[in-house]
Image: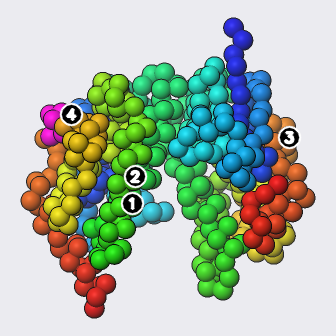
Amino acid sequence: MDEVKLFGFWASPFSQRVIWALKLKGVNYEYIEEDIPNNKSNLLLHYNPVHKKVPVLVHGGKAIVESSVILEYIDEVWPQNPLLPNDPYERSVVRFWAKFIDEKTRPMWEFLDKFGEEQEKAISKNFEILKTIEENIGLEEKKFFGGDKIGVADLIFGWVIDILVAQEEVVGVKFIKADTFPRLHAWMKNFGEEPTIKNNVPDHNIIVDYLKKRRQSFRISAHP
Amino acid sequence: MAEEVKLFGTWGSPFSRRVEIALELKGVPFEYIEENVSDHKLKSPLLLKYNPIHKKVPVLLHNGKPILESLIILEYIDETWKQNPILPQDPHERALARFWAKFIDDKVNPPVWRALLGSGDEREKAMEEVKEGLETLERVLNGKKFFGGETIGMLDIAANFIAFWLRVVQEFSGLEFLTPDKCPALTKWCDEFVSCDVVKEHLPPREKLIAFTKNWLSGNGWTD
């Protein structure tokens, strides 16, 4: 049995997706916590020289890098509890949404790091992004983005249940409410209640604390 | 059973041309629909119906179902038509192909346009990014004839931008992205790639692309 290692960071949404995938498939792995951003280990830099980022999965000594690529790899190597449908067309739809969510939700972090008018704009933009997902992803027909089981697109959006919720508390804004985003709201409940997910999220207060410090450091650099 | 395969594309787009190459490689007959991408108002209602979110080409239509995003389409094509596989069998090799294809789209393609559009420091910075990206890919090629080995694979197809578009921009602008002294194998790869039977019919006419790009640079918009 080849050894599986994961280099990650506890507060990283990208890292978290991979942990969830490995847990959902019951894959045993060694976890190495990286001190991001300032003190990355030599091993991490060795395995990911191009981007120097987490997460990095190392399987039998070979490195796989980029969370979306890692998720596909995990699904191919450990086929139990599949994260992608069997049908090629259905797979392409899930991949489309996984990519869309991955790319479009990245700037959603900005509202935490900005102030004043810039922050308002960032908050506004977040509502727009969520609206596009709410209206197009077809959740009215299914429990999760991929169907009735959790799949890659769900794992990629999953950061909203813990990290976004913590960010919202730090800033004092709420995005996904039952009346404004009914489908996403229902999805959050379904996703968050899955035992594997529920048991593998960092403590809310610890995330809030970390994000408060992060926001503070941005405040200092914005207003020296 | 007659399968209906249609491709909505545009002559000048590397993303669109990738899909043509893959279909050609697999010997899949298809109907091609040229889209006017310069003006949203001129895009066909069918394109807007099949890709309402991005409103972009390429869109592959297979038996009435749309598949979007060139790399996702390539995966779909490989899963649907099994002859002449474009992705490797081994999961780690597949992960590498996916990683490097994404790398080209995220790290090599955008700075080429930034270098072309920019000036001074911005241009210098963008050029450095492109050159670094190309030198990395030189190492990835590692003396092979193609990224896929003896025959072209998904990563070669994804790198079509480098083999043709980047070199065309280089020739008419004088911006030296790819040089044989820094990237001898990659330079050779470019020539091999564009000479492949399945590729050469699926490159834009060179002069037309130059005129088009120059027109765009002078601020006339992306018009035909």
Specify the farthest residue to the top. B1
Give the foreground label among 3 and 4: 4
Using the numbered discs, state the Cα–Cα distance from disc 3 to disc 2 in whole angstroms.
39 Å
Using the numbered discs, state the Cα–Cα distance from disc 3 to disc 4 in whole angstroms.
50 Å
Please tell me whether residue B12 is drawn above or below residue A119 in the rendered image.
above
Which chain does the residue under circle 2 lie in?
A: A
Residue A71 in picture, x, y percent from top left = 38, 41
Which chain does the residue under circle 3 lie in?
A: B
The reply to whether the C-beta atoms of the residues labelled 2 and 1 are less than 8 Å apart is yes
Query: Which residues are drawn in magenta?
Result: A191-198
Going by the numbered disc 1, the residue's amino acid type is Lys
Q: Residues within 10 Å of mark 4 (few under 14, many from 20)?
A: few
Q: Are marks 3 and 4 on the same chain?
A: no
Residue A73 visible? The answer is no
Nearer-N-terminus badge (4/1): 1
Q: Are marks 4 and 1 on the same chain?
A: yes
Magenta span has A153? no
Q: Which residue is mark 2?
A: A129
Q: Are marks 2 and 4 on the same chain?
A: yes
Please tell me whether residue B125 is drawn above or below residue A145 in the rendered image.
below
| Residue B201, numbered circle | 3
Q: Please identify the dominant SS of the magenta region.
A: helix
Using the numbered discs, state the Cα–Cα distance from disc 4 to disc 1 in whole angstroms.
25 Å
Q: Secondary structure at mark 1?
A: helix
Quadrant housing the N terminus of chain A: top left
The reply to whether the C-beta atoms of the residues labelled 3 and 4 are less than 8 Å apart is no
Q: Which residue is mark 4?
A: A190
